[in-house]
Image (cartoon, rainbow, N blue to C red):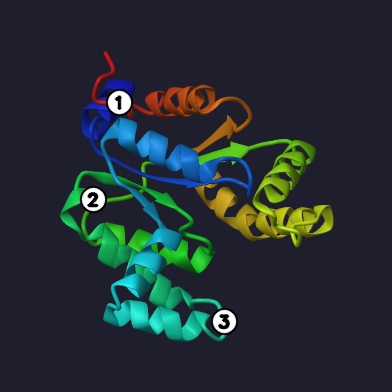
Amino acid sequence: MTEAITQTTQGVARLLIVGPPGAGKGTQAVFIAESLGIPAVSTGDIFRDNIKNETPLGLKVKEITSTGALVPDELTNELITDRLSQPDAANGFLLDGYPRTTGQVAYLDEWLAGRGLQIDAAVQLTADTDHIVERLLKRAAEQGRADDTEEVIRHRLDVYAEQTAPLIDVFADRGLLITVDGLGTVEEVAERIHEGLEARGIRRPDAA
């Protein structure tokens, strides 16, 4: 069975990564995507690029966010699938920051299924809460973010846990969840992620 999975997924991987603020998710997303030869697709980057280039979708996002409102699922879905339709994502991608809701999961499933595709794995970075708080407080001090108090940071972590728990359950139920300790150097964490991916037949192009 493993051999069959390897044959179908090696060099082609459609992944997503989730993790609490301060766990290094963004760094790992770029690191892992580069090693697999697929694009890292960040919701935040997509929003910023479309706003900067004043695309029709970007103008909609700008109008919404300028009032302090959240970008609705419908528009977020449209932006993401527009990005995933680009040539560099034909052989796979690593989603960072999407999906955030079960509604977005359902939309992504339907969009991929319409192309005979599906998500291959979901990487969940975990980290001790106290360690993350300490890391984010240090970052706040270095960057002069006076508003990032311990209370605010712990609230953000609670919100993250509450919002992502249903998503994590969805992918765990499908047998696609890879849980990885997010503490350590970038290289150490990346190696743990690759070990989890390789167990599912998803290997780096240069892997033996």
Residue sitting at the far top: 208
Percent x, y for residue 37?
26, 36
Residue 93 visible: yes
Percent x, y for residue 14?
33, 45
Q: Which mark is residue 204?
A: 1
* Image: 164 above or below 199: below
Q: Which mark is residue 69?
A: 3
Residue at image point 46% right, 22% down: 191
Residue at image point 52% right, 61% down: 100
Instruction: Label 2: state its secondary structure.
Output: helix
Q: Is residue 76 left or right of residue 171?
A: left
- Circles 1 and 2, Cβ within 8 Å, touching? The answer is no
* Image: 31 above or below 172: above
| Circle 1: residue type | Arg
Q: Quarter of the image for the N terminus: give it.
A: top left
Residue 78 visible: no
Residue at image point 57% right, 31% down: 180
Between discs 3 and 2, the one toward the N terminus: 3
| Circle 2: residue type | Ala
Percent x, y for residue 102?
52, 64
Residue receiving disc 2: 89
- Circles 3 and 2, Cβ within 8 Å, touching? The answer is no
Between discs 1 and 2, the one toward the N terminus: 2
